[in-house]
Amino acid sequence: MIRNFKAFGLALVAVLALGAIAAQGASAVPLTVEGIASGGTVFPLGDQDGKTHTFTSSAGNVVCTEASFPAKGSVGAGGAVNEITVTPSYPTEKLGGGNNCVAFGFANAHVKTNGCTYTFTTPTVVSPGVVTWHGSQVHLECPAGKVIEITPTSFGASVCTETIEPQTPTSGHVVGRNVAGSVPMDITLEITLTGIHYIGHGAPCDPKPGGVETTTQTNGTLTGNSTIKCYSNEAHTTQVGCTFS
């Protein structure tokens, strides 16, 4: 989520997550991985911690039951991870079948992230094993000309579209925690981001009369939790421990 956000990135990041994670700087390293040498790459993989992620706008709620957050980042000295880029994905159908996302009262919705990614920068260490990012430290970045798109459908036809452009939310926070007793160690993110920018195109995505609003709205919120495990390979078959300092 960055400069002008429109998807929730629950997209519906959710969000969306997502989720990316960055180190705090030379004096502190909030994320450290085990078993990967300096110069190597870590491949975190996040889910929704068994719960839904919800993006809320003036049009209503967008709720997704399942999502995947593959990521990667460079590993420095001592296992320090200075930046991780997360690419959220929201399937149309759940693994067991049935619609995965619902939006604005419609029983099916498509969330297209279109290559948009999340980057978290410079978190604050709250206590051992706990860090936090203010909303202004969480960024949604997209390829040139791309945005996140949320499209509810009815009988297979598109109803309207809500878009979230690259941006940085203006408020809210994300809290990262170590999962006590997990082997290898994994982490969680607790997401409460507000001040997300979005645009509704057509009713009911734009709830104003006529559904012709093209002005960016700034009252979007994204909530949800994620569990993140770290891997030494992109196929996510070899898990390694990762912890917040």
Image (spheres, helix red, strand yellow):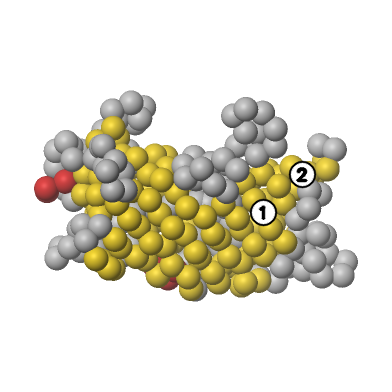
Q: Is residue 143 above or below residue 204?
A: above
Q: Where does the C terminus fall, quadrant-wise? A: bottom left
Q: Which residue is drawn at the image coordinates 49% and 64% (left, top)?
A: 192
**Which tag, 2 or 1, sits closer to the chain's start?**
1
Q: Is residue 114 above or below residue 7?
A: above
Please name the residue that numbered disc 1 is placed on: 62
Amino acid type at mark 1: Val
Please name the residue that numbered disc 2 is placed on: 107
Q: Position of residue 116 (x, y in %)?
A: 50, 49
Q: Is residue 139 left or right of residue 150?
A: left
In the picture, residue 214 is in which quadrant? bottom right
Amino acid type at mark 2: Ala
Q: CA distance from mark 2 to mark 1?
A: 10 Å
Give 205 or 180, whichever is nearer the viewer: 180
Q: Which residue is drawn at the image coordinates 75% and 55% (left, top)?
A: 104
Task: In the displayed orientation, state which residue is furthest to the front.
Answer: 181
